[in-house]
Image: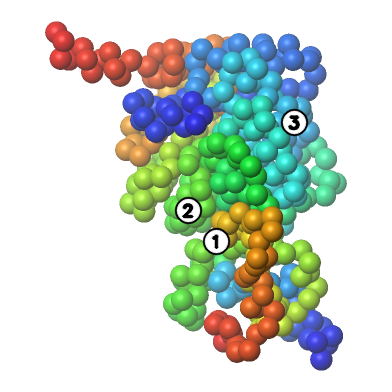
Amino acid sequence: MSRLATLIDEGNRPVVTAEFPSIDGGGLAAVEKAADELRPFVDAVNATDNPAAHAHASNTSIAIAMSQFGLEPIMQVVCRDKNRIAMQADIIGASLFGIQNIACLTGDDVTAGDEPEARRVFDLDSTQLVKVASGLAEGHYLSGRAIKQPPALFVGAVENPFAPPLDYRVMRALKKAEAGARFLQLQIGYYPERLENFVAGCVEHGVTRTTALIPTVVLTKSAKALSFMDESVPGISIPAEMIARVAGAGDKDAIAEESYQLTLELSRHALSLPGVSGIHLTDFRHDGSLERLVRDLRIGPAFAPDPVASASGTTSV
Amino acid sequence: MPKLLPLLEHAVKKPVWDCRMCGQCVLHSTGMTCPMTCPKTLRNGPCGGVREDGHCEVKPEMRCIWVKAEERSHSPLNPHHWEEEFNELRPPVDNRLQGTSSWINLINGRDRRTPAGWDGAARERHSAVPGASMVEVDEPTTLPEGFHS
């Protein structure tokens, strides 16, 4: 069982996951540097799979390298670039190196990237991939061919509570949970009420009985970054008043501070919802704000109060 | 006749549903909206890229087919059991059926044949009944359930 799975199962504190930066060159030293920056503050980190349809060092190579540098990887697998044979091979191959956490995604379309002329694959969809990956852990490929000593995978997926059809998103989460997803990292979102409705729906329909919900927040430095996400990132919409609030904060430093405060508020709100098991952090600032956020929230390996110590503290005084 | 059926099916379904002849039609369970017209050919619901206005990430001028499908699945014209089927997990597409008639594949059950691993079972190397689920559907004697759809 992966450390992430254990932490979620125990449920003693919110888990903290983050996004690993894309790596292109610089050898393993580049991976080590990024791993060193994240390691103290997070429980596990997503090794992305050609995010936004841009080629980078592969999900499997980054996941393996991360684990060598003592960072627990969540290997993302997107359906856009490979067929069912290749995706199963990647998961089984990575598992030889101890990779256990697998996040199954549809993937941004090729038109979102810098090679829009590429062939899109989508041989499986993300829900089917969840089921296929779960099957690998049960000891067989999709064909039925048996796997001796199958890997102990912890399979999850992503869901977007903020994109239409809003009413249907809970049912889609349920479908993924029933297919075998044990965690759902949620898309970046700036509509707290939509998150609230989604999480409440997941609790009501039993999704959270089997599956941990992990909302995502983003650390940004400027209103321009928010506008960019609003306009250019598929599936992300940001209310105009939120962008205006950050833009109108004053000079550059004041704007950066207001951006941080917005992220802090969204994080506190997300973590306050019954049914939420942790938080996923995407850091576009790289200025120490990630550490500040987990410190302010008092979460993660570095800053969470030790639940055992605090529990025994109440009785041993 | 079997050779003409795909042509006839295409002639009927292309103008109405923009049919892509995947050969394993699920129209009735997706609000009579063809999931193969989704640029990502998703058969189990919308991706996370749907725009705020309900339009497609890939083709901004097109409404997301799953937004449409979800709306239509609640249509009073839709039989209730079709609405329930909307939430079912649809298996991966069998790419060998591309271009064949889903009508024939429905009648002989070929469109419901899935790999052994999809149904959860590891196949033994020398199993006495290799692909047991495949045997019965190749020799249909009665029309399978759901034929009316």
Q: Nearer the viewer, mark 3 or mark 2?
A: 2
A300 in relation to B142, above or below? above
B67 in relation to A113, above or below? below
Q: How many marks?
A: 3
Residue A304 place in picture, x, y as percent: 37, 16
Residue at 65% x, 78% y: name it.
Answer: B137
Circles 1 and 3, Cβ within 8 Å, touching? The answer is no
Residue A143's image quarter?
bottom right
Residue A15's image quarter?
top left
Q: CA distance from mark 1 to mark 2?
A: 9 Å
What residue does disc 2 label? A178
Disc 3 residue type? Ser
Q: Chain of mark 2?
A: A
Work out which quarter of the rendered image holds the N terminus of chain B and state it.
bottom right
What residue does disc 3 label? A58
Asked if both marks, 1 and 3, belong to the same chain, the answer given is: no
A22 or A94, nearer to the observer: A94
Residue A47 place in picture, x, y as percent: 64, 29
Residue at 63% x, 24% y: name it.
Answer: A20
Q: Chain of mark 1?
A: B
Please tell me the numbered disc located at residue B89: 1
B127 in relation to B73, above or below? above
Q: Secondary structure under badge 3?
A: loop
B111 or A272, nearer to the observer: B111
Disc 1 residue type? Leu
Q: Secondary structure under badge 1?
A: loop
Residue A147 place in picture, x, y as percent: 65, 45
B148 or A226, nearer to the observer: B148
A190 in relation to A194, above or below? above
Is there any visible trace of residue A53 in the rendered image? yes
Asked if both marks, 1 and 2, belong to the same chain, the answer given is: no
